Amino acid sequence: MAMAADDNPTKETKLDNQDPEKVKARLLAKYPPKVARKRAKQIVINKVDPDGKVPVISSNVRTVPGLIGQRGCCYAGCKGVVLGPTRDIVNITHGPIGCGFYSWLTRRNQTDPDSSADGHNFMPYCFSTDMQDEEIIFGGEKKLKQAIQEAYDNFKPKAIAVFSTCPVGLIGDDVHAVCREMKDKLGINIFGFSCEGYKGVSQSAGHHIANNGIFKHVVGLADTIKEGKYRINLLGEYNIGGDAFEIERLFERCGVTLVASYSGNSSIDAFANSHTADLNLIMCHRSINYVAEMMQTKFGVPWIKVNFIGAAATAKSLRKIARYFDEKELTDKVEAVIAEEMPAVEAACAAVRPHTEGKRAMLFVGGSRAHHYQELFAELGMLTLSAGYEFGHRDDYEGRNVLSDIKVDADSRNIEELDITPDPERFNPRISDAKKKELEAKGLRFGEYNGMMPEMPEGSMVIDDLSQYETDQLIKIFKPDLFCAGIKEKYAVQKHGIPLKQLHSYDYGGPYAGFKGAVNFYQEIDRMVSSRVWQYMRAPWQEHPELSASYAWE
Ligand code: CFM
């Protein structure tokens, strides 16, 4: 498949034009000089120095107008991503109905209402103020108050959150004043987010705004200590396709107590108590590192990076938890669980590997999965040719050690940085400096994330904020066996005869996390890369070259 003739046999052979430098030049060739200069800094050929240093990649910068990108908006990052998966908050979208509708469970984030005593689950509802022309002209605050009142009357929730969309910012509705007024009137927690879609350069801005809002309005509101010996929070796991359920199953088996999850399968009471946990685990660094940092500063809870995508990564992450608590009872339990779970995983992997070995994948997803899923492909013996984030920052690519070099531009300055100080009564460093040093000497790393690039092969292409045009070019040049992205890319890629796995919503599948998830993933990828259907696909322009308009592309 990799060596198959190109669409146009007169072009240079595949082997020649797969040289990453040449590919980069080809991706940039058609751009106007200014655009090419900007994109050149976002298309990097990976190279890892012996000390783990990787090249600088420009990221978290504005998308060039006219390029079709994959990104979402600030509102999507705040409402859809971070707060959306919390089942017992009534999340009201203040804006036109489309914003609420589009962010209504399309992410396939699941929840288990039975795990809350009151059984509240508002996620199946789409709450919106359904703004009309009249509100755009005369203001929408009155309608927002009515919406909050109506939601309260119908559902009696513990909390209501309000999310601003673009027009709300443009006309200047003060959602925070409305929330304060309604909070006083109704006596429940009501808070708003200025997460207008246009804020920042992507949904990443919305993550930060959401983190700030939860921290200001919820974290620390209750001090109930959940029973359990090894008490952790899982940050940046959103229970897409049931991932969090599988991770929770493993915690339970190991005797680890989950205090709060941000925010898959979560409840607002768990957030309120989350500062009482002894350790924060970060899955998705991009979307939630702010909460972890703020919790560490204010309450003394340390954080470590984990990854439950991939069987080996899952085992490693469970061992990291055991190493932190450093008690034989937990270490033995974790080892026993790994020993029990791994044989089924290894058998499933061995069964598909003859079909997947040597196949080549590309991953362009969000701000974390383009990294994490490389673990699963490596287990399948597949090569990641190229990968990139939609909206990751330099630290997600190069590691947190570059944080101090990142220039703060006007778009980032737009987003509030909370000034957090230790809580006078409740700050409690969970481990002593001496213990921390001892654990570090044994290899446990606190507050560290090394990013995606140090783990990628030399010569692989790392591309930030990939455009549709570049996607088409990459596919023509490499003919990968599998492309991973989202629903917006899916059908355009499949029309090239390349299967696309959605790594946002998982198409209809999942879970892919943990041990059982790894088995699901192996089998799904085997089906996709082994299917013959793609070889039979002929797009209309392949049969009728006059439709190809190839002069515009080549
Ligand atoms: Fe984190 Fe996510 Fe992701 Fe993300 Fe997302 Fe997502 Fe994602 Mo889609 S929080 S950065 S904003 S892991 S919704 S669950 S799949 S782009 S890679």
Image (cartoon, rainbow, N blue to C red):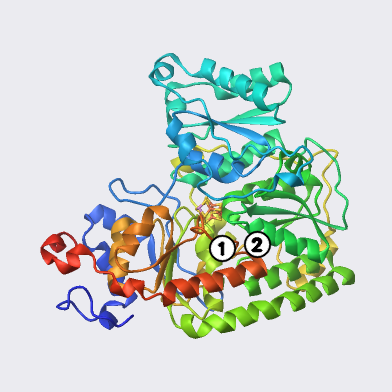
Along the viewing direction, whichever of 72 and 253 lies nearer the viewer? 253
Residue placed furthest toward the left = 546
**Is residue 554 visible in this depiction of the protein?**
no
Under mark 2, the amino acid is Glu
Along the viewing direction, whichever of 68 and 349 lies nearer the viewer? 349
Q: Examine the rendered structure and indicate whether residue 123 appears above or below residue 288.
A: above
Task: Tell me if 468 is positioned left or right of 259 in this view.
Answer: left
- Callout 1: helix, strand or loop? loop
Q: In the image, residue 493 lies at what x, y percent?
A: 34, 62
User: What's the mark number on residue 373?
Assistant: none
Task: Tell me if 29 is positioned left or right of 326 in this view.
Answer: left
**Is residue 221 visible in this depiction of the protein?**
yes
Under mark 1, the amino acid is Gly
Q: In the image, residue 331 lies at what x, y percent?
A: 83, 72
- Mark 1 Cβ and ligand 1 under 8 Å apart: no
User: What's the mark number on residue 448?
Assistant: 2
Instruction: Please rate how many residues cluster around mark 1, counting C-alpha atoms within 10 Å: few if below 14, some from 14 to 19, many from 20.
Output: many
The residue that appears at 58% across and 60% down in the rendered structure is: 400
- Callout 2: helix, strand or loop? loop
Q: Quadrant of the C terminus?
A: bottom left
Name the residue that disc number 1 marks: 399
Would you say the residues marked 1 and 2 are in contact, meaning their CB atoms lie under 8 Å apart? yes
Task: Tell me if 187 is positioned left or right of 485 in this view.
Answer: right
Q: In the image, residue 211 lies at what x, y percent?
A: 62, 42
The residue that appears at 60% across and 61% down in the rendered structure is: 511
Instruction: Please rate how many residues cluster around mark 2, counting C-alpha atoms within 10 Å: few if below 14, some from 14 to 19, many from 20.
Output: some
